Amino acid sequence: MSARVLMLGNEAIARGLVECGCSVAASYPGTPASEILSAAVQWRKACGVPMHIQWAVNEKVAMEIAYTASLTGLRSAVSMKQVGLNVASDPLMSAAYTGVVGGFLVISADDPGPHSSQTEQDSRLMAMMAKVPVLDPASPAHARDLVEIGYELSETFGIPVMLRPTTRVCHACQDILPGEVRQLGRKADFRKTPARWAATPAFRFELHRELAGKLRAIAAWPRTAPLRLNPHAASRRAVVASGVVSAHAVDVLLEAGLWDSVPIYQVVQPYPLHSGFIAHILEAYEEILVLEETAPVIEMQILDRQRVRGRMTGAVPEAGELLPEIVDRLIAEFAGLPVKAEQAEAKGGGRRPTLCAGCPHRSSFYAIKKAAPRGIYPSDIGCYTLGLNLGGVDTVLCMGAAVSQAAGFYQAYHLAGEEIDIVATIGDSTFYHAGVPPLIDAVVQGARFVLVILDNSTTAMTGYQTTPALGIGAAGEPTGIVDMETLVRGCGVGFCKVGIPSRLPEFVGLLKEAVAYSHAHGPAVVIAREPCVMDRRLASRLKTGRKARVNEECDGCRHCTEQFECPALVYDDGGNRVFVDTLMCTGCGVCLHVCPRGAIVEEDQGVVGKS
Amino acid sequence: MNRQPGGPAAGRQQIVVSGVGGQGVLFVTRLLADAAIRRGESVLTSETHGMAQRGGVVVSHLKAGVFASPLVRAGQADGLFVLKEENLSIHRGFVKSGGWILVNSVRVGEADGDETLHAIDADGLAHEVGNIQAANLILLGFALTRLGTPDQGGMLFCSVDDIRAALHQRMGERESVLWSSIAALDLGIFHGKR
Ligand code: SF4
Ligand code: SF4
């Protein structure tokens, strides 16, 4: 039997880190990057190597910790999703100037589509802005290899290197032969060089010039030069592609019988694009089709507007993922083949996501609508964004914005002398990540709103990572604890009370009290504390046994399915009456309070045996 | 490797698995991928993670054999597993003409073109055995017998033994889960033979 194992792209990246002797890895979870850090924990254990691996409170902190380890000569890495890179952009811009000692990888996972993100921004553009090289893997195996090349590049030129996988790499699986794990035997050894590590603006100019020199050299570094995939093909037209789009293009060319006639180049390092390559393709081809996700990073570096086709010229759609169906059409057009009749793209539609049966967030949103029926409900990023389905979420901008948007709404209405109810929701992990500074600001400005911190003791959306309140690290090790109530009070908030959302009537009462307080005094915080039902670690803390049953009073009014939307409440075949899917019901008992006709009642204890 | 040269299941195969979050779409896909590796094939899959996993549409792609891209194109799949019947209309466009579709459904629906449609009420059976999580493996077991395995010139690239071995490899340490999974697979196999 072969020793190849199936690895998720993110596991392959983590494997690369461990094989290359990475000593410090930090991250904040975000789809599609989350599994990189958890896989690093697994590989560390399996390979028995010394490594510091941690979830950080946010991406900026993660980047600064990992970057600093590189200043001591160790290899390090930070991983995040693309919008996390926005949060970490401050240290990135500066680190490009100051450079690195040990190899430093910034892994920023993009999400063309987008599938699970607020934007489809291209981290490669951020690399370009920061002036650091970026590598664009096409598959899990390629991503693992590029970790190694990335470290070599980083140490050869003393520069941070970005690895930019996309969702289709992170969440692809491939059979991979695990490589040898190298122990570099390095020890932290920080050499004080204030002119570099604490450079003042005058020195920064010098550092910038030095950086420009590095980039020129990197644009000629053979290890990351574009690959000519089918050297035998000759034509006056060529395809230039990177990332997973180059993989789609290879399959499309093979299947369309164009492999021997259309030259294809795979760009491994989209920025800086190799200068020799630019000269070569402009010399050799009359027409060049550039296929890349999501911004025209390669395209804009090929400075010939006459010959290049891509996102900027309109030849390639300017937004969205380049799915193989689209690549197929683009290549057929480019090669002058008849374009097949629009194939039914098997995409879109279908059941929308919803909060799990028994999710405590559902009762929180239901209670908020009861306590402040005419309120404005700013919210944030997490499972609870799905409160959208329940009418409990009016805005979602970016991490932490629930708090500042609540303040913004208050100030805007306050100008006109209007005092409205504002009830914002934010998850526990998101609150620690970016909710604290705006809460301090709200206290200072006397903004009047209620902030409900949905504290389910986990970062559920991205795979149940721990939060600072738990005292548990990435590998389950004990860590320090930051107590949420103390933190909220420390921000200067005068009203901070904890409630259990599944005790619906009491919780509505608590919210009403908070709303009244906020109108009189300023920000009020309610901590809705109840564990996520899906997090296995927390399962023991759940009480069960209030299984619901629907009696004859149900007239199919749809209140519970539309306003409350528990997936365990389903219609019978005729759609006339609701019943409880007993295998799905967690027994949270909240729906007992939801039916206006009182038709949802508690199942007799005797019947609840099955679970 | 003991492949039937030229047999319909030899070498490359593209499969799409469709369902909603919580049904174990990824699990089935990874078992099939493990099975491909056992047969000495290269394999690429593509999975849905993130918000869709909270009960939304989840679809994964599997390509056994030599491919570069992890995604299956519309009209190219050899077969489609549908764990949630309502997804059939959304994802049947993946299947090529002459391909097969396996649906978790109480009734056998109509084939659109010349695909072969097989149905099993995997949810009903899963409810009966008190394990709603098991519908995915019941469907897979059913598929293995209905489609036939490569050694008999069947339509699927892997065999019951490959999947059993993959289950052991993935769950070896959690015995009770392993045995309930094997039981679910066997239940599907049993119904496939009927
Ligand atoms: S995973 Fe947890 S937090 Fe997310 S919807 Fe399900 S129960 Fe709620
Ligand atoms: S008790 Fe009611 S609300 Fe809670 S999970 Fe069961 S059906 Fe859903």
Image: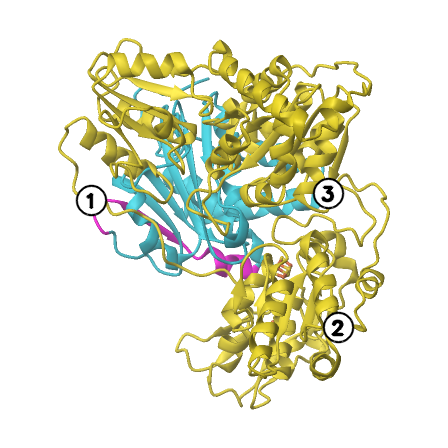
Chain colours: A yellow, B cyan
Instruction: Tell me the element at label 2.
Output: loop
Picture coordinates of residue A54, whole percent (x, y):
75, 38
Q: Residue furthest front?
A: A202
- Chain ID of residue with mark 2: A
Query: Is A259 above or below relative to A432?
Result: above
Instruction: Tell me the element at label 1.
Output: loop
The residue type indicated by label 1 comes to Glu
- Residue at the (54%, 69%) spot, across then down: A393
Q: Is-magenta flag for residue B116? A: yes
| Ligand 2 is within 8 Å of the C-beta of the residue at disc 2 | no
Q: Quadrant of residue A503?
A: bottom right
The residue type indicated by label 3 comes to Ala
Q: CA distance from mark 1 to mark 2?
A: 53 Å
Q: Which residue is mark 2?
A: A500
The magenta segment is B112-128
Picture coordinates of residue B153, whole percent (x, y):
34, 28
Q: Which residue is mark 3?
A: A56
Which circle's residue, 3 or 1, is located before the other in the chain? 3
Q: CA distance from mark 3 to mark 2?
A: 28 Å
- In the foreground, A607 or A95: A95
Q: Which residue is mark 1?
A: A342
Query: Is A472 above or below relative to A594?
Result: above
Are there few (<14), some (14-19), or many (20+) residues within 10 Å of tag 2?
Answer: some
Q: Is-magenta flag for residue B194? A: no
* Image quadrant occupied by the C terminus of chain A: bottom right
